[in-house]
Amino acid sequence: MASRAKSLVIVESPAKAKTINRFLGSSYVVKASMGHVRDLPETKLGVDIDRNFKPNYVIIKGKRKTVKALKEAASRAEAIYLAPDMDREGEAIAWHLATLIDKDGKKVRRVVFNEITERAIKQAFSSPTQIDMRKVDAQQARRILDRLVGYLVSPLLWRVVYRRTSAGRVQSVALRLVCEREEQIARFVPKEYWTIEASFRTRSGQEFGAVLERKNHKKIAIDDARKAEEIAADVRRQAYVIIRVEKKRKRRNPKPPYITSTLQQDAARRLGFSARKTMVVAQELYEGVDLGKEERVGLITYMRTDSIRVADTARQEAKEFIEKRFGADYLPSKPHRFGKVKASQDAHEAIRPTSVRRQPQDIERHLTPDQIKLYRLVWERFIASQMAPAQFDVTTIEIEGGAYLFKTSGSVRVFDGYQRIYAEKEDKEVLLPDVEVRDQVDLLEVQSKRHETQPPPRYTEASLIKELEDKGIGRPSTYATIVSTILERNYVEKVRGSLVPTELGKTVLRILLTAFPDIFDVGFTARMEAELDKVESGQDDWVNVIRDFYEPFRKSLDRANAMKADLRQSVEELTDIKCEVCGSPMVKKWGRHGQFLACSAFPTCKSTRPLEEERQVEAACPECGSEMVIKTGRFGKFLACRRYPECKGTRPYTLGIKCPREGCDGEITERKTRKGRTFYGCQNYPKCDFATWDRPVAEPCPECSYPIMVVKTSKDRGNYLKCPSCGSEAKS
C-alpha cells in the first residue's frame, strides 16, 4: 500500500528546521531554503525602469541544487507550509519560494509565529494564512530602491575615486551622521567654567558637601579663575544656616523589554558585542537550542522588532514567577504599560524569553558563552520590566549665607524592586545628616574647581543605532547591516570602540553630497522609510513610491555625470613632490589600497609611487648602509632606503619587541589585513605564526612572567594591560 503523502514545511535555516521538526508529527517533512533563493542579478541592474520598475529575479548563485530539491519535495507533498521569519524579508522569502515551487498557488500556505515553542508552532499550523503581498511589496520596493541607488551611483564613484567604492541609500546616510559628528568635534571650542564647592559641619559634628547654586537669588555662572576666587573668598566670610529641608519618596520604574535597537545597544555596552554579533547570537537563541532529554526549543521570541508589547500569557507567567521567587511586594500594584516606541510598526512582541521558568543558571551548561550572556540579558530585562519600581528616599538641603545659596541632595534606596535583578547603573547612595530648618552649620572648606565644556562624543555602534532609530532611518532588520557595511567598506573604523570616519569615507561622502544633496539627506531617507510603511499598510502602491523617488533621482544622476570631471578634480590634491621620471608635479589620488601619488602628466607619464609620511629611524640599509625611513605599503609599515629608487633595500618595520614564542628570534611588527585592519605579528611569518589584534607592550606578566602584555580598552576602565597567556590584568 502506498504511503500517505506528507506535508512539506520550508524554513530558512537548518537550525530552525531541526527545532520545528521536534514539534510536528511524522506527517510533516521540514526542509531549509538556506536563506534567500532568488534576488536581483549581481552583474546588472535587474530592474526594467521603462516597465514600471519590473524586477528581474534570478536564482542566487549556488542555490540551484537547493531549489531543485525543494521543488522535488513540493511535487510529492499534499500541502506546502512556508515558515520563514515574520518580517518583510521573511515574507519576501516565502513569496519567492512559492513562485518557484508552486506556481498555481494551490498547495501553499503561510505560517507565522513569534516564538519557536511547541505551543506557538502548533497554534500557527492550526490556522495557516496566505502570503501577505503588502509586506512583499514593501520589501520589494526597498530592494529596488537600494538597487537603483547602488547600481546607478556607484559607477560615478568608480570614475571619481576608484573601482571598489560604492554608495548605499541608507548606509551613506549613516556615514553622513558619523562624518558630521566628527566635524562637530573638530569645530568645537571648549569653554571654561568654574564651580564653588563647600563642606559644612552640623552642630552634632556631621559633615556634608554642597555646591553653590545662586547669588542674590540668581543662578550663578562663573567663567574665569579671578571671578571664582573672588566669590570663594567672599563665601568664606559668611555665616550659614539651613533654610530648606525637603524629603521625598521617589519611585524609579523599570525599562520596557528589549526591542532590536535597545538589545543591540545594551549588548554593546554590557557585553562588548557588535550589532552584527548580537543579531547572530539572538538568531541562534530564537531558532532553537538543544537542552538535553530530547528537548530542543527556541529560547527567545522574534528578535527583529520595534514593539514593546507583551502577550498576556507571558505577563501572567512572569507575575507568577516573580511572586513565587521574590514575594508579592515585588509585583507592581498594576501591570506596567509602556508607551509605544516612536515610529514603531508594532507588528511583533518585544524580545523576551519564551518561558521565564528557563532561568539562565539552569540552562547555562547547554549554551555557548555568548549565548548564555545574551540570554541572561534578555531574561533579566524582561523579568525586571514586570517588577515593582525601586524606591528611594531623596533629601534636598539648602544652606544660605549672606547672598549665597548652597544646595545638596542625597538619595538612599529603601526598596530595590526591579533592581533586585536588573540595574541600569550602580546608584551611589549619599546619606545626608538629619537637620532642621534654621539649624546653624559651620563652613569647613571652600574649593573653586575649573571645568571645560566637552564636545559631543563620537558615535559607538550602539549610539549610532539609537540615532538611526530616533531619526526614523532603517528598521530593526537593517540596523546591524547598516553599521557593518560602513565598517567593511573602510569608510569608518573603530578606534577604542568609537566610530571614526576614514579619509576614504570623508571623500566618498563629500562626492555624494555634492552630486546628490537630497538623496542622502537624513530627513529624505526617513520619509522614504515612512513611504515603505505605507506600502505595507496598503495606503500606497510600491510602483508609485519608486516612481516618485526615481524622477528627481534621475535628474540628479544626469547632473552628477555631467560634472564628474569637476568631482574627480575635487578629490585630487596637487603636491610639491616632483615625478622621478619626468619632473612634473605629482597629485594625490585614490586607489584600492588608499591614497597614492601619481604624475600630473598622466597619461603621457604613468609614474606612481606610494604616499607615505616618511620618518627617519635608527637603522642602516642592508644593501648600501644608508639611512632608512618608515614607509607604508599594501600590508602595513616597512623600512625602505632613503636613496630609493637608486637603492631598493628594505627591512621589516618592527616595534622593537621580541616575539614571545619560545625559540623565535623575531620581533613583532605592525601589519594590515587585506581589508585594512591592523594587527601585530612576528616578522618571521610564516615560520612563526604569532599574531594578536591588540597592541603589545614589552612588559612581562606579573602573574605568569609571559614576555609581553597587550593593551585593552573599555569604556569604564579606559586602557589596561592583559596577559595573552594567563588572562591576568594590570593597570596600563
Image: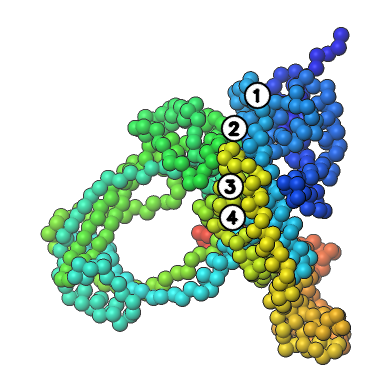
The residue sitting at 41% across, 73% down in the picture is 452
Q: Which residue is mark 2?
A: 114
Q: Which of the two marks, 2 or 3, is nearer to us in this view?
A: 3
Q: CA distance from mark 4 to mark 2?
A: 29 Å
The local secondary structure at tag 3 comes to helix
Mark 4 or mark 3: whose residue is earlier in sequence: 4
Which structural element holds mark 1?
A: loop
- Residue 388 picture location, percent across and down: 38, 37
Q: CA distance from mark 2 to mark 3?
A: 25 Å
Image quarter for residue 289? top right
Is disc 2 surrounded by few (<14), some (14 to 19) or many (20+) residues within 10 Å? Answer: many
The residue identified by callout 3 is 531
How far is disc 4 from disc 1 in space, using C-alphas? 35 Å
Look at 22% across and 58% down and name the residue there: 397
Which residue type does callout 2 highlight? Asn
Instruction: Work out whether residue 499 can be spotted.
Output: no
Looking at the picture, tell me which residue is in the foreground, 17 or 394.
Answer: 17
SS of the residue under disc 4: helix
Q: Earlier in the sequence, mark 1 or mark 3?
A: 1
State which tag comes first along the sequence, 1 or 2. Answer: 2
* Type of the residue with mark 3: Glu
Task: Tell me the residue that label 4 is attached to.
Answer: 525
Task: Give coordinates of residue 699: x percent, y percent.
Answer: 64, 69
Q: CA distance from mark 1 to mark 2?
A: 14 Å
User: Which of label 4 and label 2 is nearer to you?
Assistant: 4
- Judging by the rendered image, the residue that carries numbered circle 1 is 128
State yes or no: discs 1 and 3 in contact (Cβ < 8 Å): no
| Residue drawn at 74 percent across, 59 percent down | 152
Q: Position of residue 418 (x, y in %)?
A: 41, 40
Sort mark 3 into few (<14), some (14-19) or many (20+) by Cα contacts within 10 Å.
many
